[in-house]
Image (cartoon, grey):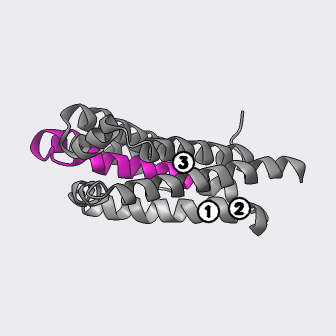
Amino acid sequence: MELNLYWTTLGVGAAMLVLGLLFAGKFIYWERALKNFGRSQLATYAVFGAALVCFIWILAHLGEADFGEYKGWLMVLFGLIGLLSLYYVPDFLSVRGLSILGLIGSSHALDTAYMQPEQARLWLVGIVYAWIVFCIVMGALPYLWRDLWNWVYAETLRVRLAGVFMLGYGAWLIAVSILYLRA
């Protein structure tokens, strides 16, 4: 099955619904997981490792025009840098890994919206671009992850508003994706 605008919009909407339920429901385990994610060794190995594998896979599949004869060297170089960073700078690597995976996923989401009518893609690309900004900021300043969730969870209203926003936008994206089928 090839990814298209319908499935991408439906998937992003479903993901936002799940996140919205986790925030609106104010699950204590979710709060703890978010706050501890930045310094979790398990999350670092899992998420940053997955990001490293995805990045090297992308490098391996570059065409000849993109660093053709240097692909092997780049894969080794970035692989070593990634592995050494796990040992020497493990703090907040899980946040950086999540940012890398978020940017890779955003690239695929934007690819599905490319050359589609503006009315069809607007709602998807709007939230994807917001996610890109979030990933870039968190990738550059990963300590803000901790500060963000401490600020959000300082008041119940903020958590509920985040949950309601995600629930509403997720439901809207699912409705929009269903309307694609009718068009």
- Residue occupying image coordinates x 31% and y 32%: 46
Residue at the limit of the structure toward the left, as seen here: 88
Tell me whether circle 3 and circle 1 mark residues in contact (CB < 8 Å): no
Residue 182 falls left or right of residue 34? right
Q: Callout 2 environment at 10 Å: few (<14), some (14 to 19), or many (20+)?
A: many
Label 3 sits on what residue type? Answer: Met
Q: Which residue is pictured at 61% across the width and 57% down the height?
A: 110
Whether pointer 1 and pointer 2 mark residues with C-beta atoms closer than 8 Å, the reply is yes
Q: Point out which mark residue 125 bears.
A: 1
The quadrant of the rendering that contains the N terminus is top right
Question: Picture coordinates of residue 180 (x, y %)?
Answer: 81, 51
How many angstroms separate mark 2 from mark 3 (CA)? 17 Å
Q: Position of residue 59 (x, y in %)?
A: 43, 46
Secondary structure of the residue carrying tag 3 is helix
Position of 177 compared to 139: left or right?
Answer: right
The residue identified by callout 3 is 16
Q: Tell me where residue 30 sits by quadrant.
A: top left
Would you say the magenta stretch is mainly helix, strand or loop? helix
Q: Which contiguous range is marked in magenta?
A: 83-108
**Residue 62: x, y in percent?**
51, 48
Q: Earlier in the sequence, mark 3 or mark 1?
A: 3
Residue at horizontal 34 percent and vertical 55 percent from the top: 156
* In the rendered image, the vertical position of residue 149 relative to residue 56, given as above or below: below
Camera-side residue of 71 and 137: 137
The circle on residue 121 is 2
Which tag, 2 or 3, sits closer to the chain's start? Answer: 3
Q: Nearer the viewer, mark 3 or mark 1?
A: 3
Distance from disc 3 to disc 1, alpha carbons, whole Å, reads 14 Å
**For the view shown, which residue lies furthest in the bottom direction?**
118
Of residues 122 and 27, which is closer to you in this image?
27
